[in-house]
Amino acid sequence: MVIDDGLLRRAREAAARLADAQRQTDLAKADYHHAVRRLHFAGASMREIADALELSHQRVHQIIEATGGTGGWKARKKATADLACSFCGLPKDEVTKLVAGPGVFICDECVRLVHRARSGSVETSRTRLDPVPAGSRLECSFCGKAAPKASTLIAGPGVRICAECLQLCDDVLAASEPQS
């Protein structure tokens, strides 16, 4: 049997369009889920979010848990003397702001350094930050997303942060700024 070249070409083009549409769908879904998590992190209850988005409370809970959950982003009952930036090691009382994740912390200065490290390695006297190759098996220390699934992953000494969690840190820091 001979395969029709024209039909084969159209099938390959359709397959490429389908793969592109799937990638776009996956990106839109991830953006939506992170927006729902940001709503919750900003103070809205899961029920309020569910009502506003016309979703079930259970679905909102699933979305929030799938994007890293809530546990690490809430205040923990730890002595503040024990808290330190996981990226540079500075204790809480020596930084302006410290954002908490699940057993990991990042200070406002390291958030700025991570943004710089997205373009290439950044080294200071206290830390070194490097972009993680997309094929790596390393995971974000904040949400657990693996490098292949994260749009960007930056590694510090024993810790990593993805672009989505970095955005959450930006949101936290912006929310804590005094209103003008």
Image (cartoon, rainbow, N blue to C red):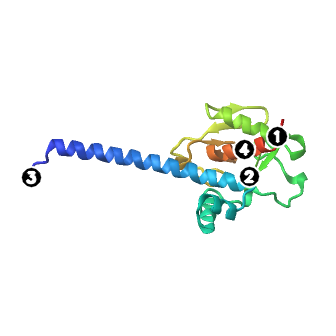
Near mark 3 (Cα within 10 A), the count class, few <14, some 14-19 or many ≥20, is: few
Q: Which residue is painted at 17% across and 41% down in the image?
A: 6
Which element carries disc 1, helix, strand or loop? loop
Query: What amino acid does circle 4 point to?
Result: Asp
Residue 165 on image: x %, y %: 66, 47
Q: Nearer the viewer, mark 4 or mark 2?
A: 2
| Earlier-in-chain disc, 1 versus 3 | 3
Residue type at tag 3: Met
The residue drawn where x is 68% and y is 51% is 38
Marks 4/1: CA–CA distance: 10 Å
Q: Nearer the viewer, residue 100 or 139?
A: 100
**SS label for mark 2:** loop
Residue extending furthest toward the left = 1
- Say whether disc 1 or disc 2 marks the residue closer to the N-terminus: 2
Give the residue type at disc 2: Ala
Find disc 3 in the rendering and name its residue. Answer: 1
Mark 1 neighbour density, 10 Å: few (under 14) some (14–19) many (20 or more): few
- The amino acid type of the residue labelled 1 equals Glu
The span from disc 4 to disc 3 (Cα, nearest Å) is 60 Å
Q: Residue 79, located in which quarter of the rendered image? A: bottom right
Q: In the rendered image, is residue 137 in sight?
A: no
Please report whichever mark, 4 or 2, sits nearer to the chain's N-terminal start.
2
Point out residue 138 in the picture as x, y percentages from the top left corner: 59, 49
**Which residue position is annotated with label 2?**
42
Residue designated by label 4: 171
How many angstroms separate mark 1 from mark 2 (CA)?
A: 14 Å
The residue tagged 1 is 177
Does the CB distance between marks 4 and 1 fall below 8 Å? no
Residue contact between numbered discs 4 and 2, judged by CB atoms under 8 Å: yes
What residue is drawn where x is 58% and y is 63%? Answer: 55
- C-alpha span from label 3 to label 2: 62 Å
